[in-house]
Amino acid sequence: MTSLTMKLAIDANVFVSAANASEPQHAGSLRFLHEVRNRAVAVFCPTLILPECSAAISRPTGSAALAAALVTQIQQWPALQLISLNLALAQRAAAITGAQKLKGADAVYVALTEAHADTWITWDKELLQRGPAIVPTLTPADWLQANVPPPSVP
């Protein structure tokens, strides 16, 4: 699959990890987002990602400025389409919560992936276990391993 046809849904935790150097997955998130951006991969996220990322940064740091900076970066991401939660997407997410026992916001990502993308990218272990019942679900590291050749050794 070429980058022009590859479509990813990226969980908020990937953007938050990339923005926060103290996160365990910081380096992996940065590398993943760098590759996705450089390859012009189509990215789909629910508009819900904006308050999710803002809260995940502002609550522990107390910095509204850092939170706003991350929200701005996401909104300016090339090849990103923010998808609003409409009735059909909400109904599908509700069905997914019942079937897969996911939290509501997580089910929105699954429903969005099912409708718009090929693969959901997340670091969340629970989501990596439950997501694949409905959509392909990978960590950023797994996506990199499958899509980016390792550096050649001289």
Image: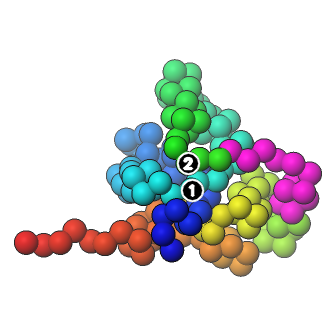
Judged from this view, the residue extending furthest toward the left is: 154
Q: Are marks 2 and 1 in contact (CB under 8 Å)?
A: yes
Residue at the spot 90% in from the left edge and 57% down from the top edge: 88
Q: Can you give x and y, in whole percent of width and height, for residue 42 in the image? A: 57, 56
Q: Which mark is residue 42?
A: 1
Report the side of 109 relative to 121 (left or right).
Answer: right
* Residue span colored magenta: 82-93
Task: Please name whichever residue, 111 or 7, is drawn nearer the observer in this view of the structure.
Answer: 7
Reply yes or no: does residue 140 show up in magenta.
no
Report the side of 42 relative to 47 (left or right).
Answer: left
- Residue 25's quadrant in the figure? bottom left
Q: Can you give x and y, in whole percent of width and height, for residue 119 in the image? A: 60, 68
Q: Residues within 10 Å of mark 2 (few under 14, many from 20)?
A: some
Residue at the spot 31% in from the left edge and 72% down from the top edge: 149
What's the residue type where badge 1 is placed? Ala
Reply yes or no: does residue 92 show up in magenta.
yes
Looking at the image, is mark 2 or mark 1 earlier in the sequence?
1
**Residue 25 visible in the shown view:** no
Report the side of 72 relative to 97 (left or right).
Answer: left
Q: Is residue 62 above or below residue 34?
A: above
Q: Secondary structure at mark 2?
A: loop
Q: Name the residue tied to disc 2.
A: 79
